[in-house]
Amino acid sequence: MSKKIYIFDTTLRDGEQSPGISLNANEKLKIATQLSELGVDIIEAGFPIASNGDFEGVRLIAKNVRNSTIAALARASKNDIDGAWEALKYAERPRIHAFIATSDIHMKYKLKMSSEEVLGKAVEMVAYARGLCPEVEFSPEDATRTNPEFLYRVIESVIDAGARVVNIPDTVGYSTPSEIGALIRNIRNNVSNIDRATISVHCHNDLGMAVANSLSAVENGAEQVECTINGLGERAGNAALEEVVMALKTRNDYYSTSTRIVTEKLYRTSSMVSFSTGVHIQPNKAIVGANAFAHESGIHQHGMMSNSKTYEIMTPESVGLKQSQMVLGKHSGRHAFEEKLKEMGYCNLEQDEINEAFQMFKDLADKKKYIMDRDIEALVTQGSNKAPETYKLEHFQTSSGSGITSTSTVKISCKDCIREEAACGDGPVDATFKAIDRSVGMRIKLDEYSIKASTGGKDALGEVTVRISKDNLKSVGYGVSTDIIEASAKAYVNAINNMESRLREPDTEEIKVLKLAKDKNYFGAGVEDDWEFEASNLI
């Protein structure tokens, strides 16, 4: 009989801590809804006390997502736990995830607390959280570098205090598969009440072993794996959900486990997260990369034509890809287009979204002879990522060439007015961005600009992702077009609209109270109380 493994997804918490990623509440809700449809057991929706946006994101998800447990992170502090519960209390199945560091280096230099003080704080705060929430998970941060005997004491004590899930984080990706496997076995053998709790693991990828470490933990008794879509996360990221799940499924003969994940929705989920975060997937990424099921070698191609199992240990269909593509063109009708969307996994689009995508498809079909799946995916993603249009790009014109200064003229509509501005720049994209800045009356900092072709050929769609910032507020924008200058302008305006929508998000009374109530000194006397520093030191 196969053992059930619970999948705990922390894309919206640890994943969003990746440098440069910042999601608003509605973007988080879209991803959480997709994660629930994917079959994720527990969705860690955020760290509510860290920011207003995190609080609102967790609360919005708790109110609207019903098929998964919704978790929120909290330090071992009453204010953190109160904030987590305030955001989580609307959930059908809420879980408070509390943590405190237990390794010698963290206790000495970060917490400035003794081991006994840490133990007492852990027990006190787990009991406090259990008084608010029916389900509490506890993490001893930096567990793989913690003195084993002290770790066993902490785990046993927090279970007695009410924790029903104990997570073992490899916070800095230091462990190896054999070491973490032995640690899980030793916890089972040395913690007397471990049968009253589920053992979880949370592995980071600093040495490239996050997935291997997670699977080794499962082999040795872990029943929950914490992971992220595409392996996003702090520094080198976390264990990739799609890799962990497909390893367990493909090698079920070895692991004898099962998960609730609908693997046919993995590619769709991966693409959504990639577009929403602006982090592209490397072509050779396992499971969901563009080359994961591609074969160029003549020997491989010959084997594939004889029997696909010669060089594929899983099918493209098992992760949501199709081996063959139905080619659409300008003569294709709405019915064929909608069927194609369903085939590609876009089953929950609203009629307005379908209408908008179809119109963009028809416009593109006038420019391209063949429309590929990747083109359609880019169009749908552009539509789904649209923010309320405070500003709309009506027209642009550029002039550039060898030996001349590039210029751009843009026309932007804003509410009831039209603004037209021109600017010079170092190339047509730079000139266009400067003209847009003048039109909207803001000085925007461009932090990152990337472009890629969605398909091959001279008529390929160009997909542009930009990251911008202004006064410490960051935003991501996305645009597609066969004209890379137009795609760039669309992405830039989209990013500004996303920023504007965030500026209009008001603070709730609850957030104002929580902000005033932050207790920065729970670590003990003398600890550095810089909130930004502490908030960044998560699992």
Image (spheres, rainbow, N blue to C red):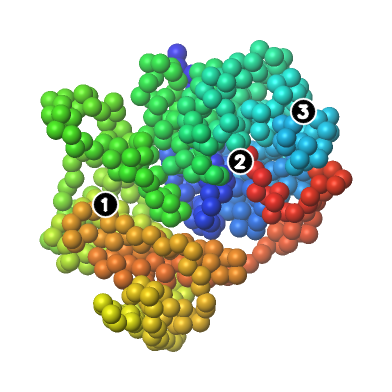
| Residue occupying the point 72% across, 24% down | 147
Q: Quadrant of residue 449?
A: bottom left
- The vertical placement of 369 against 170, above or below, is below
Amino acid found under the numbered disc labelled 3? Ala
Q: Specify whether 315 is left or right of 86.
A: left
The image shows residue 62 at horizontal and vertical percentages of 58, 47
Tell me how far mark 2 sits from mark 3, CA to CA: 19 Å
| Residue occupying the point 45% across, 85% down | 416
> Any mark on residue 387, and which?
none
In terms of depth relative to the viewer, which is nearer, 54 or 445?
A: 445
Q: Specify whether 76 is left or right of 329.
A: right
The image shows residue 538 at horizontal and vertical percentages of 65, 43
> Any mark on residue 71, and which?
2
Q: Quadrant of residue 539?
A: top right
Amino acid found under the numbered disc labelled 2? Ala
Question: For the view shown, which residue lies furthest in the right direction?
Answer: 525
- Badge 1 marks a residue whose secondary structure is helix
Q: Inspect this view and state whether residue 332 appears.
A: no
- The vertical placement of 485 against 26, above or below, is below
In terms of depth relative to the viewer, which is nearer, 105 or 538?
A: 105
| Residue occupying the point 74% across, 31% down | 104
**Badge 2 or badge 1: first in the primary sequence:** 2
**Badge 3 or badge 1: first in the primary sequence:** 3
Few, some or many C-alpha atoms within 10 Å of disc 2 (few <14, some 14-19, many ≥20)?
Answer: many
Q: Inspect this view and state whether residue 298 appears.
A: yes
Tell me how far mark 2 sits from mark 1, CA to CA: 34 Å
Residue for badge 1: 374
> Any mark on residue 161, and which?
3
